[in-house]
Image (cartoon, rainbow, N blue to C red):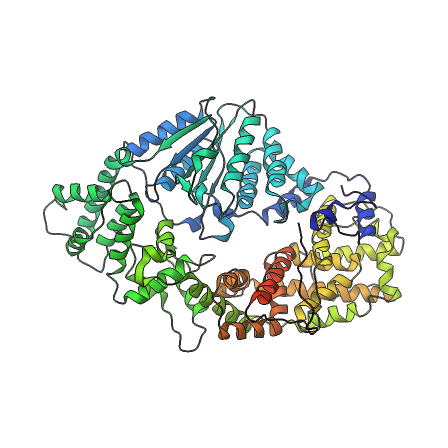
Amino acid sequence: MLPSRGVCRICNIVRSSATLQHRTLCNLLDDIPPLIPEPSSQDYTWAFFCRFVPLCASFDSPGRGPLPVIQLGSDRACLIERLEVDLDNPKNTMSWLHGPSGTGKSVIAYTLASRCRQKNRLAGSFFFSRRLTNCRSARSLVLALAYQLGLSQPQAKGKIIAALDSDPGIISPSRHLREQFVRLLFEPLEAVDWHSPSRVFVIDAMDQCQGQVPELISLLTRLLSHMIDGGLHIFFTSCDHVEGVLIKHHLFPMISDIALDRTGITRDITLFLRQSFDKIHKRHYLQCRKPWPPEEVLRRLVDRVGPQFITGSIIVKFVGSLDHDPTDRMNLIDDIPFDPPLPSESSMDDFYKSIISTADDLEQAYLHLTIVVNLAGVLSYSQLDDLLNREPNQQFDMRFALSQLSPLVHIPDGHDSAVQICHESLCDFLSNSLRCGKQFTPQALIHRLLAYSSLSVMIEELPDDSDLWSRLSRLATESGSVSLRAFDDAEVLSFATYSPPEPLPFLSTIWRIMQWQHTGLQTDSRTKLALLYFCHTWQILQHLDLSAVTTLPAFRFLADIRSLPVLLAFPIFLAFEFPSSQILGSSTLEYHHRIETLDVVAEIVTDVLALKDQHKTGSCALDYACTHWAFHLSLAEWDDDLRSILTAFMRKKLHQWLVKTWCLQDLETCLRTLCEVRELCLAANPPICFDPNAQHTYQCEDQG
């Protein structure tokens, strides 16, 4: 519940020195009568939460790509059994599996998560990945684990829903990680009546969490220390070091420490290679006698692969290419100068260089691989071509260029299947100039290409929405009139939740309330949740500097929305951010100047819902561009062409981007992106300034 009058908690979250600018709305939320329990209200809150959960981080996400299967009877199968025993040891509530990159930690984590699910022991899983924007932050982990915990534990789900009902802004990026952890994980876990066997959180590649590994480990450790009755075990994997710091220094004593080394998996490497080569022999109808390759060749290969399963997996794909003779490819492998006694990185570098050198055009091979590893999301070959072929005299054919590198890139079966690289270690190799050598392509140039391409796609494909723009402008010009001021009436606001959270029924209910037709109305807890979340976002909008309204239509659009009374802005917000099942149509009520105003809002709502339907059929390249253009821009090397197209986009299409991205995501994300891009423009040399007042400097005020 929001504090009334004197102090507004949401304002304090947004800006600690904020002046209360929405007293009426705060009073409204405080004065709502006790809510009538409704079976559907919890479903609505849970559906609201699901919008922000990174489902792609789960161990069984389809976007994760294929993983090798651990063979029964192998050393790693025995390790899985050992890990399962550790889950039931009350003295060890956390297990840490660690080792060099490429030694198969993710496969073990995947197998353990799969087995825990089969035995109804999996509380949740999260697989970090630097390549996916929703899979590399501690906040994403909290949301994903809370969501999965709620699916399996009704008591935890009830706690999560209660936290969201009282404070929907808890899921905001502006909130502190510790607060989110406590409200969405710690308190729900405490509410669970745990029974044997213990439940398990499986977390893979903790070292790929961006900049928050020590804090995250500290929070997980504190969580386990408060779980007095047990019932929860955390299993996580990582490399030994993160940014030069030994992870072990951040762990507490009650932990099972398992190191993957050469002696533990040599047998598994041998078994994997022998079975894989037998399949290649059969598939290619080789005439040479079995075993192929001969045992001495296989032993030499196992010695050279060492503990790195990823190396063995790439060799199998390389030798088994359907376009080549496996015996010739095996001879090439025998000549590759990789040596496991060397440091892990050095061995993998030589191996990657040798595989890439088999491509016809070495420069193009490195370029195309570097593009794939720097994507912020997943795209198919055709979608990548659609995104990239935007600059004059530029022609990409990703499928052709990468087909020669199939050991390093997963070749999708379907036309729209996502391109996947073989392993995160390839990203590390391609992003390091010392390791990559003279073929290194600077990431800033790749991000410049992706930023330029994204801006081009949006300029060419974003549709105009002149009806929505003109209707909102017309409504905003009346913001000071008597008819609009009536919608800030405190008595009308106090009945705002006597409506379902649908924009058109909301407008109809407001009209009935203004006509004093209150009889039989009941409050709707779903609408209160939507209002609370709207209040959180509304305050971020209130504090946003919109001084560029005269030069950037997008800022005028936001200024128009900000000028509206709450009861008129709220249904527009509902139309953008919440699913609607309403049949569109105009009002049939008798004429009144207030009804005329409500009709204009209803027309805006209708425009928004129609746009949302249109955006469902938009190209994947356009969706990618709208979601990730600012990310690529922030890492790009700027040149005159990029500055020119950015300026054109900001003036011509930023408004359309705002509308589409609001439909795709949420307004808070849009506002934060605008702040980031504005700061990038000011930091450019020379600065790009859209404010007609030359001496004014843009400031995106601190939002928490």
Q: 371 and 470: which one is in front?
A: 371
- Considering only vertical position in the picture, is 405 above or below 224? below
Left or right of 674 on screen, residue 569: right
Task: Report whether residue 592 is seen.
Answer: no
The percent coordinates of residue 200 (x first, y second) are 48, 32
The percent coordinates of residue 50 (x first, y second) are 59, 47
Q: 680 and 328: which one is in front?
A: 680
The percent coordinates of residue 313 (x first, y second) are 28, 47
Task: Report whether residue 11 is seen.
Answer: yes
Question: So how many labels did they put on this image?
Answer: 0
Single out the residue that lies furthest toward the bottom: 392
- Taking the spot 58% from the left edge, 70% from the top edge, the residue there is 687
The percent coordinates of residue 241 (x first, y second) are 41, 41
Q: 245 and 555: which one is in front?
A: 245
Give the quadrant of the N terminus: top right
Left or right of 294 on screen, residue 702: right
